[in-house]
Image (cartoon, helix red, strand yellow):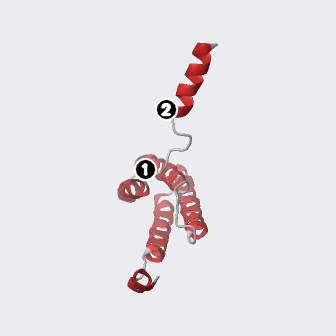
Amino acid sequence: MRVLCFSLFWLFYSVPAIASVDLEKTMKNMAFQYKQAYDAQSASQLLLPLDELISLTQQSALADFEAEKAEQFKHGLQLVLTELQLARQAATEDDITQAKLHLQKVDALRKEYHQQRKVSIWRLLFG
């Protein structure tokens, strides 16, 4: 019984309940995977980076965002995830052209939401 209690105690305190997401590292990895996917010449080359992008997007949605923009950013990540899933579906159907069109939509969403993330100098100065 002591061994069981000690084991449970050790398990709960040695493993964090929810691992925080390093959003900067995840986004850099997403940029790399995006480039790999966009440069792919065949559907089989496209699927691996798309799967990784989907996984990274899902991880990003778990990150802690600024309270006032959390809903907005999570909505943006959901839109990205939808486009990535459509790109994956097109790639499984061997339609690389359509898959890359979905990737272009992902890039447009990235630009849009990164622009919204920027803080104005006036807000920094005056709150």
Q: Which mark is residue 49?
A: 1
Question: In this image, 52 relative to 39: left or right?
Answer: right
Q: Nearer the viewer, mark 1 or mark 2?
A: 2
Q: Position of residue 86 (x, y in %)?
A: 57, 58
Quadrant of the rendering where the N terminus is positioned = top right
Pointer 1 or 2: first along the chain: 2
Q: How many marks do you count on the picture? A: 2
Q: Amino acid at mark 1?
A: Pro
Which is more toward the observer, 97 or 50? Answer: 50
Amino acid found under the numbered disc labelled 2: Ser
Residue 104 or residue 81, whichever sits in front: 81
Residue 14's disc number: 2
- Residue 25: percent from left, percent from top: 38, 54
Give percent across and percent down for residue 69.
56, 71
Dot 1: what SS?
Answer: helix
Mark 2: few, some, or many residues within 10 Å (few <14, many ≥20)? few
Query: Picture quarter containing residue 115?
Result: bottom left
Quick check: marks 1 and 2 in contact, CB under 8 Å? no
Please provide percent x and percent y for residue 125.
39, 84
> Is 51 positioned to the left or the right of 4 in the image?
left
Q: Residues within 10 Å of mark 1 (few under 14, many from 20)?
A: many
State the CA–CA distance, disc 1 to disc 2.
32 Å
Q: Secondary structure at mark 2?
A: helix
Q: Nearer the viewer, residue 92 or 10?
A: 10
* Residue at figure coordinates x 55%, y 57% from the top left: 61
Q: Nearer the viewer, residue 53 or 70?
A: 70
Q: Is residue 104 above or below residue 123?
A: above
Q: Which mark is residue 59?
A: none
- The residue positioned 56% from the left and 40% from the top of the image is 17
